[in-house]
Image: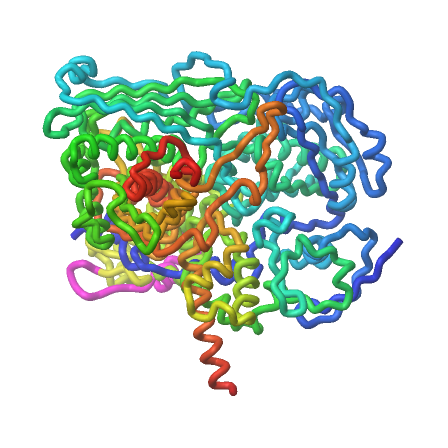
Amino acid sequence: MADMMTAGGHVRLGSNAGQGLTRRDGVLKVTGGAGYAADCRPEGLLHAVTASAGIARGRVTHLDVAAAEAHPGVVKVYTHANALPLALSPDNKIHPFVWRMDALQSDEVRYAGQPIALVVAHSLEAATEGARLLAPQYDAQPARVTLDDAEPYETDTTAFGRPSGHSSGDIEAARAAADSHLTTTVETPSQYHNPLEPHAITAQWHGDQLEIDTPNQAIGLAKQTIAAFLGIDPSQILLRSPFLGGGFGAKAIVFGAQFLTILAARDLGQPVKMVLRRDQMYGPVGHRAPTRQTLQLDLDAEGHILALEHDTITTTSTFDQFLESASNASHSVYATSALRTEHHARRADIGTPGPMRAPGEASGSAALEIAMDVAAEARGMDPLAFRRLNYAKIDPSTGLAFSSKALEECYAKAAEAFGWEGRPLAPRQMREGRLLKGWGMGTAQFPCPMFQAAAHATLRADGSAVIETSAADMGQGAWTALAQIAADGLGIDVDKVEFRSGRSDLPDAGVAGGSGHTATAGNALFNAGADAVRQMVDLATNDPASPLFGAGNLGVTARGGRLHRNDDDRSESYEDILARAGLELLRGEGKASREGTPERAMFSHGGVFAEVLVDPDLGQIRVSRLIGAFAAGRIINPRLARSQLLGGMIWGIGFALHEEALHDARTGRFVNNDFAGYHVPVNADVPMIEAMTVHEDDPFVNALGIKGVGEIGVTGTVGAIANAVWHATGIRPARFPIHPESLI
Amino acid sequence: MTFNLNLTINGTAQQIALDDPRVTLLDVLRERVGLTGTKKGCDRGQCGACTVLIDGQRMNACLALALSYDGAEITTIEGLAKGETLHPVQAAFVAHDGFQCGYCTPGQIMSAVGLIAEGEAGLDPERVREGMSGNLCRCAAYAGITEAVLEATREMSAQEGTSA
């Protein structure tokens, strides 16, 4: 009876959860009624524009502040010379989720695009022109912006304190016993999140109370962090982030220009709005760093992997560290008796990288899946058969059993839907007209973290409820899926649930990231609902006037807004129970986190199959079919989960074929920091595409059995496309994005 | 110097006093008129988030200098529904989950309304995809967008059939 989950004792998950409801915020979003941070227009609003550094390393020697301030409408210009102080240095890393920031603390330029001034004006036009008039002059130093000119250094960690290396098993012995040794090198470029909504903030002070509208993926943490740097109490801050226009990791952190805006609003005594221009999102708000990855697979005569080594070289900034932990993607996908992974860091004159949708996993999976195809080819095996041969029954990096792993079912379902059977082993065997056709596949895998969350669920006298947690909906569907879970926790219909979310004066829902938000906030909401029901059960079963009297604490089930006796068919409505108790409101509280050291390896899995068509003369590549099947535990809302999975897979198309940020080697500046030059997939790039899910019960991952679907779609897909390109052309891609000229 | 700009926005004639000739139609709508449904994603005509109808044609409002459209009729996302009744394109976007974060959505929908009016794409998914490719969706809700445009096209031609 897996559907009759009774984690809360009296309630079951399943009446609302599992339904493919349309988005509860859908009408707001299709009518223009959903309010984003840049839509705020408080009375007396001033507009702020930052000026960005045009060099990658050196000092600002002159800014024509007089010219900017003389421009009609300009109110004030802030530079390093008159910067307003923060309570802590913006270079202070007060916790691992703080990135060292640029808030005009000096004249030093550490990367191109760094804010070097803030111009505040009565209109956006005046602020924009004021920033242009600053005409900065620099003392520039040579820029180091690529993997090759960046400076190597030693570090024991990659990101969030994770170790930079891993070793298990005896790799030298395994290698010596192997029959063949296959080395693959893959390079990935700098990529930028590019949410369609640029980072924005509207800040206003009411006395010592600060109100900010700014999109953020970790509302509670952001409030704490902003308070610490301002030297005020967190209770003095109200942060609103009801809708994020995409985040993908870029909005998980706070950044310097937000503080410049907040400080200006306090200094000027008026609300101030600052919105980054598209080009200004290249530098100060994170990116996926480039990698150069080398993999060695050592196989026995049958094709079993005896040893797997994955080595990554990547860049971070000169002043902070976040490493794209690509090698970790090889830890848990395929069986091997020996495993060694390493990361090597280099410092470049760039903004600090950060987590970007499937950080580490996306880049690492791309390389690993190519290496797997190289090995399958060397063994003369079908790529899927080769992966099945090396199916990991336990996590090779830890020796732990998987909490659940329906990967084989994913392979089977996606392969059948795709029509993989009968695929010719050799490349260049299939054509469609004059185009070369190829088929490739890859394995998708993504971890299932849990963060910490708290929630309230309050039943009202009319049988409706209000649920509260500071969840962040950046498009994944939190407004809908979390309400479905909460409604099941309360045992009422989701239509009776009012959901308050997206603001910092609510219980902390943790971070919307790591594909762990639905699991974390969802479990907290469910527990809050169950707590409210538990209190109501106590009221009813102890009340001689209730038909539930004497049913006993475990003799009652909540559903449909009523408590039902388990021993006969009597029941009572929530309204009646609350009315007789004289209660207008009954509030439950819930929390969720994962305690202790996990005794299982917890991952979502999937199989992705791609077909590409390649022009033999021009090298143009089109993904003509893309099909994935995923096992991700309990699916709360199949409609929204499909959208998340499809979105991730299309990010895989972008990774494989489009996305690449390029610097000018002489100045270190970007040459393509806009949508004309930095390509992301458009509608015409996405042909027949499908994402399916397979049933998976997971009793270990958390009480509700929820994994995550936000990021896994990127993994597997990139490699599947690259492998299809090889199958079409016989040319093995060695770098992403795969350029047409590399195929002719 | 003040410039008088006459626009009919969502059916209502408005005279807007502009203190600055540099203002784009997008910034007039968002910052001066207060119609913030139309979004700014790139401010240089590359993403389509600001798509509105100008005299019935879909255009990037960020590339339209407001004063050069004096006298024009503008339709924005706020002007599409009839009271509580969604326009068929809006309803289809909800039904087919043609969006995630919702930020590009007003532009996608206005672009779809324009595309359907142009009558060039019809019910050919390939042409719909091509015709909608000026509107980026970073969440990549493209499959739902295409399904929504096709359904709305069918729905609107059926409605036309019954009213004719």
Query: Viewer-proximal residue, A232 or A420?
Result: A420
Question: Which residue appears farthest toward the left when viewing the image?
Answer: A302
Query: Viewer-proximal residue, A64 or A480?
Result: A64
Query: Viewer-proximal residue, A291 or A21?
Result: A291
Find residue A321 and report its horizontal and vertical position in percent.
48, 21
Q: Is residue A66 left or right of residue A199?
A: right
Residue occupying the point 74% across, 43% down: A46
- Whether residue B106 appears in magenta in the rendering, the answer is no
Find residue A123 and report its horizontal and vertical position in percent.
76, 46
Residue occupying the point 36% across, 31% down: A734
- In this rendering, the answer to whether A334 lies above or below B120 is above
Residue A34: quarter of image = bottom right
Q: Is residue A256 visible?
A: yes
Find residue A418 and report its horizontal and vertical position in percent.
24, 53
- Whether residue A586 appears in magenta in the rendering, the answer is yes
Find residue A733 and report its horizontal and vertical position in percent.
35, 34
- In this rendering, the answer to whether A304 lies above or below A693 is above
- Looking at the rendered structure, the number of numbered marks drawn on it comes to 0
Question: Which residue appears farthest toward the bottom when viewing the image?
Answer: B164
The colour scheme of the drawn protein is: rainbow
Residue occupying the point 16% across, 63% down: A568
Q: Is residue A488 left or right of residue A381?
A: right
Magenta highlight range = A565-589
Q: Is residue A220 visible?
A: no
- In this rendering, the answer to whether A516 lies above or below A113 is below
- In this rendering, the answer to whether A495 lies above or below A162 is below
Residue occupying the point 55% across, 33% down: A285
